[in-house]
Every structure is written in C-alpha cells, then in structure tokens.
Image (cartoon, helix red, strand yellow):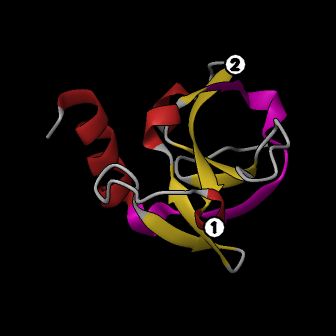
Amino acid sequence: MVINRFDVFKNPSGAKDWPWVVVVQHDLLDRLSTRLVIPLARKSALGGAVVTRLNPVWTVERVAVVLMTQQMGAVRAEKLTQRVSSLAAHRAEILAAIDVLISGV
C-alpha cells in the first residue's frame, strides 16, 4: 500500500478519543519501515483550550479533530492499513505546527 504524506489513517492503537493519525514523514523516505505520525484527537474529548498554532483544528469524517503535534511519534508502516482521508490541503498549517514544537517559532 502506498502511504502518502498527510494521509489520515485510523489510529493503530485503537484509542477511542484519538481515532486517527496523520502521516507527516516525507515521501522520499518511504522505504523506511516506520512513519512519523501525529495523532488527531476528538476536540470534544479535550478538556481545555488548545494552543492554536501548535494544535490546529479540522474535520475528519464529520468529527472536529485537533492535531496533537506534541504527541508526534513513529509507527510501523504495516500498521497503517485504513486510510480515511488526507490533510494535504492543510500542509502549511501542519508544518507550521511542527515548527512551533521544534523551534518555538
């Protein structure tokens, strides 16, 4: 299966309140056995306010979700089996959120 950058997959962990992950690893590294992903949490499951630039909000499958950039991690590519959407249209916001996490800018 081809896994593209910014594709959204069902979370392999099965977490109810964190149902999806978005792939942020560049496509040039598709030969690696893992993919860098950021979880998407249900906005309704988060108790407090989110940091707008770090945690932008979008809709996936008619559910408001928050990009949990600070929870970024790697998963085995073979675990990403159920593609549900793409956030490629939000590329600039996703990369800006990673920049905030890494460099504070």
Residue 99 placed where, x, y %? 25, 39
Q: What is the quadrant of residue 1 in the picture?
A: top right
Q: Nearer the viewer, residue 93 or 89?
A: 93
| Element class at badge 1 | helix
Point out which mark residue 44 bears: 1
Outermost front residue: 47
Say if 30 sits above or below 61 in the image.
above
77 sits to left or right of 50: right
Residue drawn at point x = 33 percent, y = 40 percent: 98
Q: Earlier in the sequence, mark 1 or mark 2?
A: 2
Q: Amino acid at mark 1?
A: Ser
Give the residue at the far left of this rendering.
105
How many numbered markers are drawn?
Answer: 2
Q: Residue at x 82, y 33 (%)?
A: 79
Pick whichever, 79 or 3, lies toward us: 79
Q: Quadrant of residue 59?
A: bottom right
Q: Residue at x 38, y 58 (%)?
A: 91
Q: Which residue is mark 2?
A: 33
Most foreground residue, 78 or 102: 102
Is 66 above or below relative to 102?
below
**Residue 34 covered by magenta stretch:** no
Q: Is residue 76 visible?
A: yes
Residue 60 vertical position relative to residue 52 in the rendered view, above or below: below
Tell me the amino acid under the disc marked 2: Ser
- What residue span does the magenta drawing correspond to? 74-90
Q: Position of residue 56 (x, y in %)?
A: 40, 61
Q: Is residue 25 visible?
A: no
